[in-house]
Amino acid sequence: MFSYGSYYYIIIGLQIFCGIHSYRSGTLNRWIFLIAFLPVIGSIIYLYSEVLSNRSSFRSTIKPTINVGAVLNPGGNIKKLEEELRFTDTFANKVKLADAYLAAHYTDKAIDLYEASLTGAFAENEHVMMQLIVAYFEQECYEEVIPLAKKLYRLPQFARSKAHILYALSLENIGNIEQAESEFKAMKGRFSYFEQRYQYGLFLMRAGRDKDAWQIFTDMLNEEPQLGPLERKGNRIWFAQANEELRKISVPENTA
């Protein structure tokens, strides 16, 4: 039988594993608060979101976003985070509050805090830059997205990130259609990249290329039965939306 001491060491070991894994994945800034302050629940959430859902190359590459602030502050207690920042003006407190603002769609406030936090040793913090891409895109500031994305482009995690999708969409919105399609093509892959491929299909439809879009959506749905239960569950929204878009497209000739 396990003693309480044994459970303690298991929990510590779990925290250490999650911390090292997160550091090597380049996501430590996003997860450190959850792992440190909610060691059991936080580690379980981390393992499910970042380890188990990534155990196979045949998986979705855009994972559900977990709002760390909402977990640590039930009810989305933004006022508490604002007080913490007023009391202790640190990079971490700025980012926690900015993340909460962004999740609550107070996008202007989020942008102000993210921009203010990019100074000194944190001038090129990848989490902040990723979040700024999301915030700028929500505000339709597409020209602001481009330089940030270029700074992050060579990071391994950028290739599979939401920020990469928004980069491609921003290129489309500023009229750089050819480069936008190049980015979407870079995010294609069998049994993976389902959100990216869905967005690529929409891009093709906007370009009047329904036949190409039909093929993208059809390939996605043909792959669905071959995925494991976790992959199917994690990507069911993209399969449902791909199926919905297919209903809007006439089936091309010479396809069966």
Image (tube, grey):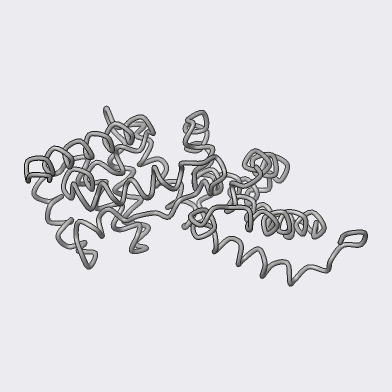
Q: Position of residue 174 (x, y in %)?
A: 63, 48
Q: Position of residue 68 (x, y in %)?
A: 27, 53
Residue that appears at 31% across and 36% down: 118
* Left or right of residue 112: residue 194: right
In this view, the residue in front, 128 or 3, is 3
* Left or right of residue 195: residue 144: left
In this view, the residue in front, 85 or 2, is 2
Q: Position of residue 28 (x, y in %)?
A: 30, 37
Furthest residue toward front: 1
Say how many tags the image has.
0
In this view, the residue in front, 74 or 230, is 230
Q: Is residue 117 above or below residue 121?
A: below
The quadrant of the picture occupied by the C terminus is bottom right
Furthest residue toward right: 254
Residue that appears at 24% across and 58% down: 71
Q: Position of residue 69 (x, y in %)?
A: 25, 55
Residue that appears at 23% across and 53% down: 41
Q: Is residue 93 above or below residue 245?
A: above
Residue that appears at 22% across and 44% down: 35
